[in-house]
């Protein structure tokens, strides 16, 4: 695959330059890319009244300005989340602000919501011709004096053009942003957004993206606020400010959010706790350290309806998507969670996870990361 070969070459560039070049390449190649091969029916999953061919999606952060959602769907993702988008354009934090930690299968970023603003994203979303599920991740400008007002404005502008909206209150790279996860502030924010949603001709699913660096009590309170607000789901989780002692890279002490393999256990634990708390009332998206079918399977067993990845893609290239789906299919077929000829196996797996909550663990040994 040309994109996979290009991805290997781009690894020689500094990480942010490699990312920009990858997006430009995907944008240039999108019209020439064929539709992806059909996925095994056992991967099909129904969420928000739609059936997706696979639960594997692209997390926010790769396509900040909604430049290439259809190209990424053609690579085999079941859904794509663009952003984070703020009301006004902003440059983000000073460079360097993106660091590869290959020894740790991880990345640290302190990008700071660099994006071209909601008008630019709206124009690209309006011009889409693809049909796959595309969500938009929204945030507030760093210098905003009214962050809740920022979220309300960008929601009102972009929600009509997206299939769902994810509210990012968990980036560690905008000072004070994570304070919006505190109970009273979160109530105010979600109240403002649900009021905006009521004004839409076609209401859109509203999800909250939370941090992994929360206590058990904080996670429970966030779940309670989300349920009371009537939103549709939670994305667990964003990057972590923790620095495990096992990190070996020379970049391990860089400030910012850590993603990739070191985040996997923590983010999956948050996911399990959320599922135990909310039962079947919310859609949960598991993200953090996914780079194999076994990783995706563990997220599903922990209670996720859908699974996202980004860091694994950045480190390994687009061939990772098909490999994860092959491995996940093999695990699902082996466990016989539903008939091979019909969709719904993922839904049944999630139902098992809902019943058993935090006790769910994958039955299989991890498939070796290649």
Image (spheres, rainbow, N blue to C red):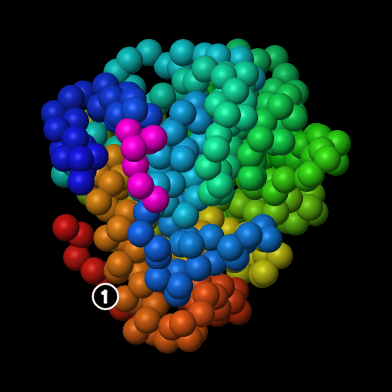
> Does residue 32 show up magenta in the picture?
yes
Q: Residue at x 29, y 40 (%)?
A: 314
How packed mark 1 is, by other alpha carbons closer than 10 Å (few <14, some 14-19, many 20 or more), is few
Measured from the top left, where is residue 269 in percent x and y?
Answer: 47, 61
Compared to 168, does 296 lie above or below? below
Compared to 182, does 152 lie above or below? above
Quarter location, residue 274: bottom right
Q: Residue at x 73, y 50 (%)?
A: 231
- The magenta span reads 29-35
Q: Which residue is mark 1?
A: 365
Measured from the top left, where is residue 158 in percent x and y?
Answer: 67, 31
Quarter location, residue 251: top left
Measured from the top left, where is residue 175 in percent x and y?
Answer: 54, 23
Number of callouts in the render?
1
Of residue 113 and residue 203, the one placed in the foreground of this image is 203
Residue 102 visible within the image: yes
Of residue 31 and residue 221, the one placed in the foreground of this image is 31
Of residue 318 and residue 35, the one placed in the foreground of this image is 35
Of residue 327 and residue 262, the one placed in the foreground of this image is 327
> Does residue 243 show up magenta in the picture?
no
Query: In the picture, which quadrant includes the C terminus?
Result: bottom left
In the structure shown, which secondary structural element does the residue marked by tag 1 occupy?
loop
Quarter location, residue 56: bottom left
Q: Residue at x 64, y 45 (%)?
A: 164
Residue 263 visible within the image: no
Q: Residue at x 48, y 86 (%)?
A: 339
Q: As drawn, is 220 to the left or to the right of 349?
A: right
Measured from the top left, where is residue 285 in percent x and y?
Answer: 53, 55
Q: As drawn, is 280 to the left or to the right of 284?
A: right
């Amino acid at each position: 695959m040309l994109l996979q070969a290009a991805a290997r070459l781009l690894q020689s560039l500094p990480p942010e330059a490699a990312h920009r070049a990858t997006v430009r390449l995907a944008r240039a190649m999108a019209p020439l890319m064929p539709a992806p091969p059909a996925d095994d029916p056992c991967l099909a999953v129904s969420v928000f009244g739609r059936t997706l061919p696979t639960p594997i999606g692209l997390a926010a952060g790769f396509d900040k300005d909604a430049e290439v959602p259809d190209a990424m769907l053609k690579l085999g993702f079941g859904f794509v989340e663009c952003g984070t988008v703020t009301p006004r354009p902003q440059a983000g934090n000073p460079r360097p602000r993106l660091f590869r930690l290959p020894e740790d299968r991880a990345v640290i970023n302190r990008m700071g919501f660099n994006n071209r603003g909601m008008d630019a994203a709206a124009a690209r979303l309006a011009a889409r011709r693809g049909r796959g599920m595309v969500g938009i991740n929204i945030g507030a400008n760093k210098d905003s004096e009214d962050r809740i007002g920022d979220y309300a404005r960008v929601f009102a502008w972009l929600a009509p053009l997206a299939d769902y909206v994810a509210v990012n209150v968990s980036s560690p790279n905008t000072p004070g942003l994570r304070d919006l996860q505190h109970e009273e502030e979160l109530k105010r924010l979600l109240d403002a957004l649900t009021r905006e949603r009521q004004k839409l001709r076609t209401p859109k699913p509203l999800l909250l993206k939370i941090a992994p660096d929360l206590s058990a009590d904080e996670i429970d309170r966030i779940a309670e606020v989300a349920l009371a607000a009537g939103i549709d789901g939670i994305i667990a989780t964003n990057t972590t400010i923790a620095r495990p002692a096992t990190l070996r890279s020379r970049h391990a002490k860089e400030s910012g959010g850590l993603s990739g393999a070191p985040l996997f256990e923590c983010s999956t634990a948050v996911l399990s706790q959320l599922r135990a708390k909310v039962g079947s009332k919310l859609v949960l998206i598991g993200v953090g350290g996914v780079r194999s079918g076994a990783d995706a399977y563990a997220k599903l067993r922990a209670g996720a309806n859908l699974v996202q990845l980004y860091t694994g893609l950045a480190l390994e290239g687009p061939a990772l998507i098909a490999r994860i789906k092959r491995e996940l299919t093999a695990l699902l077929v082996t466990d016989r969670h539903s008939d091979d000829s019909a969709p719904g196996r993922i839904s049944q797996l999630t139902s098992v996870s809902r019943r058993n909550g935090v006790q769910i663990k994958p039955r299989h040994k991890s498939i070796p990361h290649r």
